[in-house]
Image (cartoon, rainbow, N blue to C red):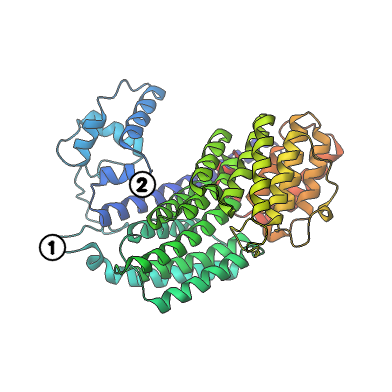
């Protein structure tokens, strides 16, 4: 079948994906407007995570790109419009509607006289009434429906656009309630035990069911955070919240939803910053370096790793060792061999001083296996590691996808050196030895990228294409996140 014959189906799929993303964003805007008491116009900006300066820059870029002329807008004017101290001109309203992909009604800049009652209801808190009072009945019904959705996804393993909309909705709700309250000692003890269990299970559990379990737990945490109590109790709740949000962020990264992974890391940072524990703050930043390394900017990876090292201090700890190792690997990939070797030596020294400390096989504990992972990845980028022939070269009990990621590091290094056939051979071997339920976007996307410059007639290239085709049933999520495919 000719390639052009697929274009209508592809276009339809992209339209559906765009509709899912836009509807999710509109739900977020309404939640911010209803619960935070800001105007709809401001809620659109906050829902995208933009500062006022970023919004003006985006507007100017839009006008330049679409030849719409220079917008009569500034940060001061935008603040005035958002806080109902002034009203933009009709031409500017049109530009804002283009920017936020909305209409004047959804921007709060026009009245809606439609007689139909369909569509999503916008929650507006009345005078003398708190947001929680206005939404109590809706929250009870929504929570029951949401829990049913996650349980169904856990059993069937077939998430859709609404599933990920709910994941993002939970994060926004958690952001709003982080500073509002705590629970009693018994409830916190149970929560601590649950978090510890999830950190242990995460080492072997596929990311999709793990994300479902964590979402259910976070829903409970948010409900328990209804009233503020003593600071010691608040710290325990925030610590548990940080760990749960880190698990969610990492799972989303593996599934390929890099946008939501970034936002969940942001929530984890907010929670850890509230705790005030420097090592916890360092841990969040050190963990986020993996997302930036695989899907972001290497310079930003190094910056964040160094920030984590500064927060972790000189005492040996998992965050300090992880941050140094992450910095070494990123520097090696950037071609700064001297600095990479120094950072790797520092990571080795920190880890050596951790001997005798707890080495439980838990998520976020920097063990011998994690040191091996980062050491090997760094040496591959430096051109020092010997070829890896198979998974049996790794220590027993190695985390499920870590060997595959190391092999893909080696394959990417070879591809950059021009040896595309050997790169594809190694990538195919890596994918074949990853269980289907763990063969998610983080490994498949990296393997697929190797095909871009490879000769399609090479046997190794054909074999890799076949393995990728066989992996398609495990990649239901990939089609939902085109940004991950292009990372």
Q: How far across and how far down the image is residue 217, in percent? A: 47, 69
Q: Is residue 352 left or right of residue 268?
A: right
- In the figure, 159 relative to 403: above or below? below
Q: Is residue 169 left or right of residue 10?
A: left
Q: How far across and how far down the image is residue 358, in percent? A: 63, 64
Badge 1 crowding class, 10 Å Cα cut-off, few under 14, some 14 to 19, many 20 or more, is few
Image quadrant assignment for residue 143: bottom left
In the image, which disc is placed on residue 329?
none
Provide the residue designation for mark 1.
Answer: 128
Q: Nearer the viewer, residue 281 or 73?
A: 281
Q: Quadrant of the C terminus?
A: top right
Q: Secondary structure at mark 1?
A: loop
Task: State the residue at coordinates (47%, 68%).
Answer: 216
Provide the residue designation for mark 2.
Answer: 47
Mark 1 to mark 2 CA distance (whole Å): 26 Å
Q: Quadrant of the N terminus?
A: top right
Q: Nearer the viewer, residue 21 or 425?
A: 425
């Amino acid at each position: 079948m000719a390639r052009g014959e697929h274009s209508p189906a592809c276009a339809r799929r992209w339209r559906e994906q765009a509709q899912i993303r836009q509807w999710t964003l509109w739900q977020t805007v309404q939640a911010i407007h209803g619960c935070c008491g800001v105007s709809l116009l401001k809620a659109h900006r906050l829902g995208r995570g933009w500062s006022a300066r970023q919004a003006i820059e985006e507007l100017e870029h839009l006008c330049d790109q679409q030849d719409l002329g220079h917008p009569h807008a500034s940060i001061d004017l935008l603040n005035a419009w958002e806080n109902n101290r002034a009203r933009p001109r009709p031409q500017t309203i049109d530009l804002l509607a283009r920017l936020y992909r909305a209409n004047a009604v959804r921007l709060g800049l026009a009245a809606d006289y439609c007689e139909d009652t369909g569509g999503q209801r916008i929650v507006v808190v009345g005078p003398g009434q708190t947001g929680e009072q206005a939404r109590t009945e809706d929250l009870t019904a929504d929570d029951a429906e949401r829990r049913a959705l996650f349980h169904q996804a856990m059993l069937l393993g077939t998430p859709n656009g609404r599933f990920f909309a709910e994941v993002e909705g939970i994060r926004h709700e958690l952001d709003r309630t982080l500073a509002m309250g705590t629970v009693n000692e018994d409830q916190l003890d149970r929560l601590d035990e649950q978090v510890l269990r999830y950190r242990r299970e995460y080492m072997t559990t596929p990311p999709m069911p793990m994300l479902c379990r964590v979402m259910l737990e976070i829903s409970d945490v948010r409900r328990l955070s209804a009233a503020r109590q003593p600071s010691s109790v608040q710290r325990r709740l925030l610590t548990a919240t940080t760990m749960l949000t880190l698990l969610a962020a990492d799972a989303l990264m593996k599934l390929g939803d890099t946008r939501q992974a970034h936002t969940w890391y942001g929530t984890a940072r907010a929670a850890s910053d509230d705790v005030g524990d420097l090592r916890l703050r360092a841990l969040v930043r050190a963990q986020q370096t993996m997302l930036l390394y695989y899907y972001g900017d290497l310079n930003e990876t190094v910056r964040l790793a160094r920030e984590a090292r500064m927060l972790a201090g000189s005492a040996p700890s998992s965050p300090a060792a992880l941050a140094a190792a992450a910095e070494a690997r990123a520097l090696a990939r950037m071609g700064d061999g001297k600095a990479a070797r120094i950072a790797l030596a520092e990571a080795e020294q920190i880890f050596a001083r951790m001997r005798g400390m707890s080495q439980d096989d838990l998520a976020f504990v920097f063990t011998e296996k994690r040191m091996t992972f980062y050491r090997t990845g760094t040496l591959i980028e430096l051109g020092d590691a010997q070829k890896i022939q198979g998974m049996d070269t790794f220590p027993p009990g190695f985390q499920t996808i870590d060997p595959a990621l190391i092999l893909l590091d080696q394959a990417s290094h070879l591809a950059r050196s021009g040896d595309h056939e050997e790169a594809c051979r190694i990538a195919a071997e890596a994918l074949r030895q990853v269980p289907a339920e763990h063969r998610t976007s983080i490994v498949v996307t990296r393997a697929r990228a190797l095909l871009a410059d490879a000769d399609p007639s090479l046997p190794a290239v054909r074999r890799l294409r076949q393995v990728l085709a066989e992996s398609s049933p495990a990649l239901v999520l990939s089609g939902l996140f085109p940004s991950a495919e292009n990372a």
